[in-house]
Amino acid sequence: MAAHVEGQQHPIGIYLKIWGLLFVLSTASYLVDYFHFQGYLRWFLILLFMLLKAGLIVAVFMHMLWERLALMYAILVPTVLLMVLLGIGALEADYTFLTRGVFFLKGLF
Amino acid sequence: MAQAVQTNTGQSLPLPEGIQGIVADWSSDQRAFKNVPWGKAMMWIFLLSDTFIFSCFLISYMTVRMSTTEPWPNPSEVFGLTLFGKSIPLLLIAIMTFVLISSSGTMAMAVKFGYEKNRKMTFILLLCTAALGATFVGMQAFEWTKLILHEGIRPWGNPLGAAQFGAAFFMITGFHGTHVSIGVIFLLITATKVIRGDLDHERPGFMTGRKGKYEIVEIMGLYWHFVDLVWVFIFAVFYLW
């Protein structure tokens, strides 16, 4: 490593490779819709391609892979809290769906 | 004449890595984010707050979609395009996805050439990024026009099914489109600074006394990649789900 490296310096090849990979993953997630996959297979594939793409963008394009752990954890760990909000939202939605069924759609339950 | 004590011994200790590094960085009684310009750390913290805003939208969308008793309009059909007499599902959205990913690719390379102080390449790549971003916003405007004028979708209801579809769609894609538009404006400002040589000559920027440095290209890049990142989530959970 040189004495005074300024900022993030990486060979251009890695950006081109990730770019290509993102194209492949986007095409794959589009094909999930094109071929009408349904049910859990569809959910699994959509979420898998989504997380892979997000991971590649954050890790390489946004250089998180090369940052010190102090920054990495400060930014990435708080997003885990969103899982709590997701869970609360799902519980609330189930309850709303149930009460709507009971009070507004007589005959559904 | 006062004599200064020489405190710089010319060598600094290597920073510890791993968990020890986290503890050392945070308890160092100095800035916590080492080897990172503060503008970049602040951009990351802004992006974290923006992540929470977009998550609120997407989780609210999940909540209304799960709780509605009416059928949700099928996005695959709503956003399909008819080309040469054949209807192709989600075609416009797929093209928009590729346009935005390409803009992320050119942005990443602009950052690389910026740190190499290659003024011309950085400028060209920043302009490509801005052009692709503007293309994306243009296609989104086309999509909105089609949905509002031809399909009759409104924030308070639509002829296809659950009334919440319009509210979720306009709120989420509208907020994202606003981010892209603001990004395009700032890309053009950054590109102008690069080609004028503001960063090479460390001229202070607009409304700031800070010296211009090529790190602003990377900070701009962080914002732009974030916009692409949000689109990855919108594409998956709104259009494909």
Image (cartoon, rainbow, N blue to C red):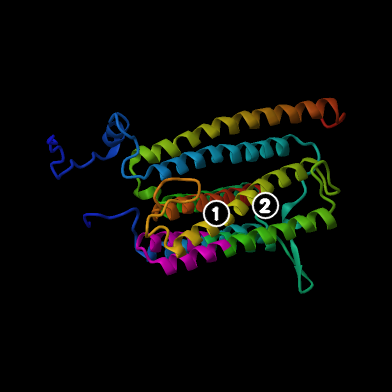
Q: Are marks 1 and 2 on the same chain?
A: yes
Q: Position of residue B137 (x, y in %)?
A: 66, 58
Q: Nearer the viewer, mark 1 or mark 2?
A: 1
At label 2, which amino acid type do we have?
Tyr
First in sequence: mark 1 vs mark 2: 1
The picture quadrant where one finds residue B164 is top right
Query: Which chain is home to disc 2?
Result: B
In the rendered structure, find residue A61 and report the number of the disc placed on it.
none
Mark 1 vs mark 2, CA separation in Å? 28 Å
Identify the residue position indicated by label 2 in the image.
B239
Is A83 covered by the magenta stretch? no
Query: Which residues fall within the magenta stretch?
Result: B104-130
Residue type at numbered disc 1: Phe
Q: How many residues crowd mark 2 within 10 Å: few (<14), some (14–19), many (20+)?
A: some
Q: Is residue A86 left or right of residue B109?
A: right
Q: Secondary structure at mark 1?
A: helix
- Along the line of sight, which residue is nearer the eye, A46 or A81? A81
Residue B154 falls left or right of residue B55: right
- Which of the numbered marks, if any, corresponds to residue B186? 1
User: Residue A19's x, y, as percent?
Assistant: 48, 62
> Picture coordinates of residue B70 (x, y %)?
81, 40
Q: Residue at x 34, y 59 (%)?
A: A10
B123 to B184, vertically: above or below: below
Residue in the foreground of this view, choosing between B29 and A12: B29
Camera-side residue of B172 and B29: B29
List the single residue furthest toward the bottom: B84
Q: Nearer the viewer, residue B22 or A22?
A: B22
